[in-house]
Image: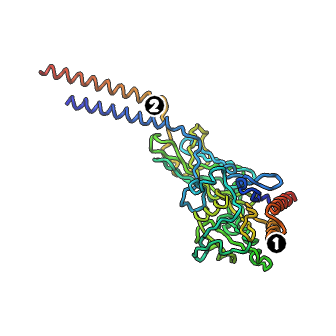
């Protein structure tokens, strides 16, 4: 009987000590860094920027914008895979957007006006929605967007990364000449004067009256002038 | 609103500068990276956690897109309590509430791990720049500072009526050590006594 009591007491003492020791360890561990950043996990509803989606090359030395538009294929609204090469021969206005992005939605009518202008037949507006497909289909239907729309999530982010925009915010628009050389990447909501300025320069590049270096300088100066005005 | 947008032109070399550090505006400034536009921090105060967002000038956060959830084991976090925001009208989403400059939110906290894990919360938020740029939803895991904070003001959700967070103090620990020693002493005494009884019996 006494032996049983002794055993019980010993086990109780050991248990109590172990419990308090573990509890104490928990307290002492509770001094982590104030903040531990975590990127949006893959599979989240919205586009994100996890490092594992960024090509290795862009992690070394920061994001880079290529000279030529890289080839890519994304899904069109009708579900068909659509290579960007399908729009060859014309200058591209590649507009990256999302339905949850207010400035993106606001600039769509401006892009729509370019797409519907006969004089701009040498330009091709292509929307790249980085979003859920169902949301884009619904929005495009409600707003009557007439220009081609490509949709993607991780794959569209990969396209953005290939353009040097590895950690995207929206909207951003890539302008190319007729030979798919990237003339400008414009971050933020486009307004009419800025759009006309860039398109005017792109036309002159296509006409052979302006080389790329001069075109870029002209766009930069023009935008500075517009902002200062 | 004057468009303070940035164009990122391809440099004359094969590669251009990092895209969102490069602006061509008169000010030379581009858009801020999201972690500079919205700085989030958190602090545990008693049975609640306070999350503080500092929002850079010219940027805003959407109230409806702010969330909190527990990220460490045996932790329950109540819904995020947010103050009323500034109402703006969105053609597509209707009336939205936004925050500029700063917003502090609270959520109740309940731990059932007796302090075995650091408190870890996951917050989600989404915002834009007034100049016409929106960042994708940002998800962060924070280890809130545990610091004494003045009593809370305003209502708390029902979940706040749960066990408050009481990290053990130094006194608690000394008490535990003392209790362990006393228990061992008692066990020793009992063992000795039982041995003595056995000898008398024989």
Q: Are there few (<14), some (14-19), or many (20+) residues within 10 Å of tag 2?
A: few
Q: Nearer the viewer, residue A123 or A36?
A: A123
- Name which quarter of the figure residue B63 lies in: bottom right
| Res A193 seen here | no
Quarter of the image with the C terminus of chain B is top left
Residue A7: where, in percent of width, then height?
Answer: 25, 31
Left or right, residue A52 beside residue A204:
left
Query: Which secondary structure lies at badge 2?
Result: helix
Q: In the orientation shown, which residue stands out farthest toward the bottom?
A: A118
Residue B107: where, in percent of width, then height?
Answer: 57, 49
Query: Which secondary structure lies at badge 1?
Result: helix
Give the residue number, with chain letter if any, for mark 1: A207
Q: Nearer the viewer, residue B32 or B174?
A: B32
What residue is rendered at 63% in x and 63% in y? Answer: A159
What residue is rendered at 80% in x and 52% in y? Answer: B28
Give the residue number, with chain letter if any, for mark 2: B172
Residue B29: where, in percent of width, then height?
Answer: 78, 52
Q: Nearer the viewer, residue B14 or B101?
A: B14
**Relative height, residue B152 to residue A125 (above, below):** above
- Mark sitting on residue B107: none
Q: Are there few (<14), some (14-19), or many (20+) residues within 10 Å of tag 1?
A: few
Left or right, residue B71 beside residue A149:
left
Residue A84: where, in percent of width, then height?
Answer: 65, 71
Circles 2 and 1 on the same subunit: no
| Res A225 seen here | yes
**Relative height, residue A42 to residue B182 (above, below):** below
- Name which quarter of the figure residue B85 lies in: bottom right
């Amino acid at each position: 009987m006494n032996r049983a009591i002794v055993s019980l007491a010993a086990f109780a003492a050991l248990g109590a000590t172990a419990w308090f020791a573990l509890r104490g360890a928990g307290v002492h561990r509770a001094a982590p860094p104030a903040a531990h950043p975590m990127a949006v996990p893959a599979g989240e509803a919205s586009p994100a920027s996890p490092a594992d989606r960024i090509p290795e090359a862009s992690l070394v030395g920061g994001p880079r914008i290529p000279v030529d538009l890289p080839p890519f294929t994304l899904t069109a609204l009708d579900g068909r895979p659509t290579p960007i090469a399908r729009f060859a021969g014309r200058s591209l206005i590649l507009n990256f957007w999302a339905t949850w992005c207010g400035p993106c939605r606001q600039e769509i009518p401006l892009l729509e006006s370019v797409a519907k202008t006969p004089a701009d037949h040498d330009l091709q507006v292509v929307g790249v929605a980085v979003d859920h497909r169902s949301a884009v289909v619904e929005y495009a239907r409600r707003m009557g967007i007439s220009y081609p729309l490509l949709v993607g999530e991780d794959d569209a982010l990969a396209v953005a990364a290939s353009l040097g925009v590895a950690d995207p915010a929206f909207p951003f628009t890539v302008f190319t000449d007729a030979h798919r050389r990237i003339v400008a990447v414009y971050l933020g909501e486009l307004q009419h004067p800025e759009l006309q300025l860039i398109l005017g320069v792109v036309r002159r590049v296509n006409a052979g009256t302006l080389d790329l270096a001069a075109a870029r300088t002209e766009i930069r100066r023009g935008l500075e002038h517009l902002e200062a005005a | 609103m004057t468009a303070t947008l940035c164009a990122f032109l391809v440099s004359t070399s094969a590669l251009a500068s990092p895209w969102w550090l490069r602006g061509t505006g008169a000010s030379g400034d581009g858009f801020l990276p999201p972690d500079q536009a919205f700085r989030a921090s958190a602090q545990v105060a008693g049975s609640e956690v306070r999350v503080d967002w500092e929002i850079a000038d010219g940027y805003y956060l959407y109230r409806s897109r702010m969330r909190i959830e527990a990220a460490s084991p045996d932790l329950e976090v109540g819904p995020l309590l947010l103050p009323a925001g500034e109402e703006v009208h969105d053609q597509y989403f209707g009336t939205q509430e936004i925050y500029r400059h700063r917003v502090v939110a609270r959520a109740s906290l309940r731990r059932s791990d007796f302090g075995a894990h650091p408190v870890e919360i996951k917050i989600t938020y989404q915002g834009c720049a007034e100049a016409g740029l929106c960042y994708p939803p940002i998800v962060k895991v924070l280890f809130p500072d545990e610091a004494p904070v003045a009593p809370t003001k305003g209502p708390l959700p029902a979940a706040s009526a749960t066990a408050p967070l009481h990290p053990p103090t130094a006194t608690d620990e000394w008490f535990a050590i003392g209790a362990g020693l006393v228990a061992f002493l008692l066990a020793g005494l009992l063992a000795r006594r039982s041995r003595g009884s056995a000898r008398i019996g024989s």
